[in-house]
Amino acid sequence: MMQKQKPYLPINSFGLIIDKATTDGILNNNEHLSSISTMYEHVSNFLSSHGLFIIITIKTIDDKEWFEDCLIPSLIRGSQNQQTKFIIHFHRCMTYTDGTENGPNIFVIVKYDCKSYSLRSSTNRVKQGLSQTVTVKCY
């Protein structure tokens, strides 16, 4: 008889992780922010330095509850003691003329090693047309 057990996945072992609508499926309402937060922590932990985490979603960086209060803190928590920073490239694929979203939007998150670490972070945003780059540095 087979025994059920968690698979062993070494930290910092994946160079590419793709989320194609998993975020949207889990976040059909805001009650599931803690579930998706846990997923992002695991992604951050498994992602190697210079690794890419690609999120294809209807979410945007304008959704502060998801982006600033869920995604960014989860990435930071997941990489505790790994001395990392994240560069987040956001590309808004399309909006209607009335301003409503038509996604999917693409986030390309790159994880880098840093020299120091804490749970504090700073963000810097640069906007160019439909694309925005957000630098999240842990210090």
Image: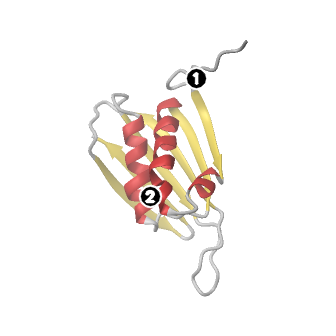
Please tell me which residue is depicted at 41% across the width and 50% down the height of the picture. 72
Mark 2 near mark 1, Cβ–Cβ under 8 Å? no
| Amino acid under disc 1 | Lys
Left or right: where 59 falls relative to 81: right
Q: What is the residue that sits farthest to the top in this orientation?
A: 1
| Amino acid under disc 2 | Phe
Q: What is the residue that sits farthest to the bottom in this orientation?
A: 98
Q: Quadrant of residue 131?
A: bottom right
Location of residue 60 with respect to 40 vertically, above or below: below
Q: Circle 1 sits in a helix, a strand or a loop, which is it? A: loop
Left or right: where 48 falls relative to 116: right
Badge 2: how crowded within 10 Å, few (<14), some, or many (20+)? some
Mark on residue 42? none
3D distance between C-alphas at marks 2 and 1:
29 Å
Q: Which residue is mark 1?
A: 6
Q: Which coloring applies here?
A: secondary structure
Q: Circle 2 sits in a helix, a strand or a loop, which is it? A: helix
Badge 1: how crowded within 10 Å, few (<14), some, or many (20+)? few
Seen from the viewer's position, the closer of residues 22 and 101 is 22
Q: Position of residue 27 (x, y in %)?
A: 55, 58
Mark on residue 67? 2
Please tell me which residue is depicted at 47% across the width and 42% down the height of the picture. 38
Left or right: where 15 falls relative to 75: right
Identify the mark nearer the N-term, 2 or 1.
Answer: 1
Please tell me which residue is depicted at 57% across the width and 69% down the height of the picture. 130
Locate the N terminus and report the quarter of the image it occupies: top right
Q: Position of residue 101 (x, y in %)?
A: 60, 74
Location of residue 102 with respect to 112 vertically, above or below: below
Q: Position of residue 68 (x, y in %)?
A: 39, 58
Mark 2 or 1: the one toward you: 1
Seen from the viewer's position, the closer of residues 121 and 135 is 121
